[in-house]
Structures are given as structure tokens and as C-alpha cells.
Image (spheres, rainbow, N blue to C red):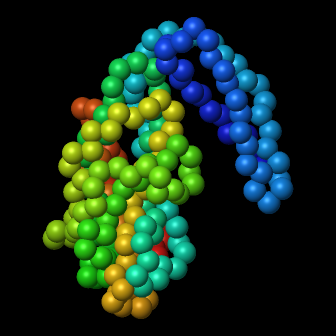
Amino acid sequence: NSWIQRSINLPEKSATYYIAFEGVANYGYGVWVDDVKIERVNVTPKTVDSVLINQASADLVFKGSDNNPILRMDIFVSGNSGTLNLNSIKIKSQNISNADISANGIKLYRTAIPIFSTADPLGSAENFSTGVVNFPTLNYDLPAGRTFIWVTYDVASNAVADHQVDASIDAGQISIGGSTYPVSAASPAGNRT
């Protein structure tokens, strides 16, 4: 389909590095690695290049199901030096009824690729309060490159069938370093039922 460029900063913990490539060829389509370059670059402070908010899935959700991806935040960071903390995130409910979400059923996860996994939770599970959920003390140092933050819902076993579950992020509700994102409210098209 298309090539994906990856830049990885190597910490200077050793004079010797061993680099390996692992590819997963789902459905037998193959994986190619091309144009590998290792170079020493100047030290530059980490900065946010962009924050994109996406609908994570439009698949159906089921009563009593956990960790259903709702939103995905794509955070692109350049630079190779310093700390760039993801401080906090506020999510706004677009659900028909927040009672359809289990107690402590809103969670964040992080991945390095745009494929959902529960391997790396971020913060603690939370609840909506007056239609907003706040993850106030994340303090996660964003690495250079791409980080994907996933908002998930646990759907209550007594949720009403065909109720929409969705979320949005108002302007300035993601705090990274000393800046806030997104510039304008983000409510990606689509929802889950």
C-alpha cells in the first residue's frame, strides 16, 4: 500500500547497539524494510508537532464488554532531548446515557502503533461527572515519534441496546508540557452502538 516512515531516537547508554527488525505479515501480504539510516543528530528539545483526534472504531459494542476503543489521539513529537509530559486529558461524553458505562469504566491506553492494545494503561479508570471525565495527573513523558492514546469504555451489563456511545474533546483539554490541544473542539465523525 504505502510506506511508513519511522524515526527512533536511541539513548546514549552504550557505545554498541544491536538493531533488529521484526515484521508481522498479517494475511500473508509481506513486510519490507527499506532505506535504514543511523545518524547522529544535534540535540533538540522535544516538541509537539501535531495532535489529531480520530474515531477509534465504528464496530458494535456489546453489553458487559470491556475496553471498547472510542477515541484515538495521535500525538506526533519531534526532538530528542528533555521531558515533554502529557499532563492531563478531559473527555466529553457524547453518549445517549452515561448510565450505559460501567463504574470506573473509562480508561486510557497508549500504544506506539495505531493498533489497539491494553498492554500499557495510562492513568487510572475514571467516571463521567456532569458529562466530563478528567484524567488530571497523567505525567507521562511522551517519546519522540508517534504515540497513540486510546479512550475506552467498559459497557455496563444493563446498558440499553442500540444506545450510542461516543466522546469528544473540547478545545484546550489535552495538556502537554506548557501547551494545550486541540486548537478547536474535536468530535470525529462516527460513533459506536
Q: Quick one: which residue is furthest to the left in this view?
A: 130
**Residue pictured at 31% horizontal, 69% vertical:** 105
**Residue pictured at 39% horizontal, 35% vertical:** 142
Q: Is residue 105 left or right of residue 27?
A: left
| Rendered view: 14 above or below 156 | above
Q: Where residue 102 sits in the image (x, y, percent)?
A: 30, 76
**Residue pictured at 45% horizontal, 69% vertical:** 68
Q: Is residue 40 left or right of residue 178?
A: right
Camera sees residue 148 = yes
Which quadrant holds the C terminus? bottom left
Q: Nearer the viewer, residue 40 or 15?
A: 15
Q: Is residue 161 left or right of residue 21?
A: left
Q: Where residue 58 sits in the image (x, y, percent)?
A: 53, 72
Q: Nearer the viewer, residue 100 or 120?
A: 120
Q: Where residue 133 sits in the image (x, y, percent)?
A: 23, 62
Camera sees residue 188 = no
